[in-house]
Image (cartoon, grey):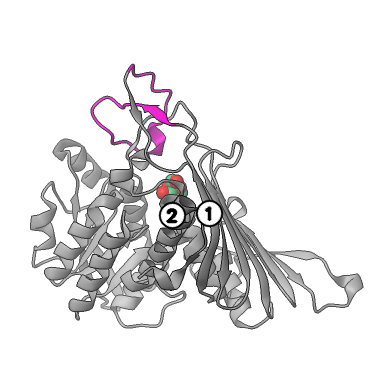
Amino acid sequence: MSAKSINVALIGSKFMGRAHSNAYITAPKFFDLPLHPVMHTVVGRNAKELEAFARRWGWERCSTDWKAVVRDPEIGLVDIGVPNDTHREMAIGALEAGKHVACEKPLADTLDNARAMVQAAKKAKKSKTMVWFNYRRCPAVSLARQIVREGRLGRIFHMRFFYLQDWAGPDTPLLWRFQGKVAGSGSLGDLCAHSIDTARFVTGDEFVQIIGATMETFVKERALLAGGSGGEISGTGAAKAAKKGKSTVDDATLFLARTRGGALASFEATRLSTGNKNGNRFEIHGENGALRFNFERMPELEWYDATLPKHLQGWSTINVSDGAAGHPYAHAWWPVAHAIGYEHSFINQVADMMGLLAGKEIIAPLPDFNEAYQTQRIMEAVTLSAKNRCPVDLSEVK
Ligand code: SOE
């Protein structure tokens, strides 16, 4: 099949740079893509490191000048995988150059910057935008959405989302993720953004009010990394640098919300829940059934059918890997119960991105900038609720 192709420019060569590069390499091998992603240019700050990255991951070119790259007439898709404070400038630059734009979550560091990105996207009529809320493309999460859309839960009373990590102890240095002017927020934007997006994705419900919220910075100061505040989570060795810097983000966020459908929602996100490594979890309780998911058991979705005779009711565990059963994305991967992992949520996303750009039907909706902006509004409402210790109606947050 002579699939058409699109030249991709990836901005970012750290954690997300690797996850996205792997996805561009692998998606064409497992999916029959209507559009082939060509790994044209990778952009980073350090030329020497970047050349090694490009060689390892198969990028044809590399550049330290993102402004020139987003204007390169050969580029069709610009993919932004760098810290949150640079999303706005890069995305708007790419949109003004007529490119399609993919951007890592959260959409931006601040609501104002996110809004500017949405406005630019609206003006750029020929450009499509996509945001990497990758957990939508865990097969179990997409199946949960399908089960809700089939009406099997009935009226939803509770949704409970918790994203529990424990990598940010006092020994973790002052990475960019702890600097409010770079990240915008800590656990809220980094972790809770996923939970908020997943809640809206799976239930199709919308938030009407943040009833109450609290945000906590447990570790007030962290060791400065030699050579600046870069580094990723993997750089969290016991940095015993003498100098320390102030952490200006939340380590943990908890909030309660009410939804348009009348459900009560509770959210918890923390980087200090000792023993939990990447515990992206949810429970959704309806009149006729319930769902449970824990990313640390990624292939599994737990289902409770409350319509069965009482003596037969109990939690069942669905291994969401059966292509013959129509499980989302399973057709592309291995035989049932041959588990896939974290990187496959990104590979599945590239398959859907290429489908979207080719105008084809895709497996799970891809959030565009406006969709991701709704999550950013909810994050802002949470921040206001925590700061002012009061309920915040979403109608007040434009
Ligand atoms: C760090 O908390 C992090 O890498 C997040 O930034 C990702 O979005 C999440 O998928 C894993 O944890």
x and y percentages locating residue 20 in the rendered image: 33, 55
Name the main secondary structure of what is drawn in magenta.
loop
Image location of residue 46, percent across then percent down: 17, 38
Crowd tier of the residue under label 2, counting other residues whose Cα lies within 10 Å: few below 14, some 14–19, many 20 or above: many
- Residue occupying the point 35% across, 65% down: 131
Count of numbered labels shown in the rendering:
2
- Going by the numbered disc 2, the residue's amino acid type is Thr
Say which residue appears at 28% left-offset and 71% top-offset. 129
Report which residue position mark 1 lands on. 213
Q: What separation in Å lies between label 1 and label 2 (alpha carbons)? A: 8 Å
Quarter of the image that includes the N terminus: bottom left
The residue at the far right in this view is 311
Q: Does the stretch in magenta take in 230?
A: yes
Percent coordinates x, y for residue 73 in the rendering: 8, 67
Quick check: is the Cβ at mark 1 less than 8 Å away from ligand 1? no
Q: Is residue 316 magenta?
A: no
Q: Label 1 sits on what residue type?
A: Ala
Q: Write down the region rendered in magenta.
A: 220-242
- The spot of residue 151 in percent (x, y) is 65, 83
Is 288 left, or right, of 167 in this rendering? Answer: right
- Is 37 on the left or on the right of 98, as rendered? right
Which numbered circle lies on residue 71? none
Q: Residue at x 40, y 42 (%)?
A: 249
Residue at the spot of label 2: 383
**SS label for mark 1:** strand
Are discs 1 and 2 less than 8 Å apart at CB?
A: yes
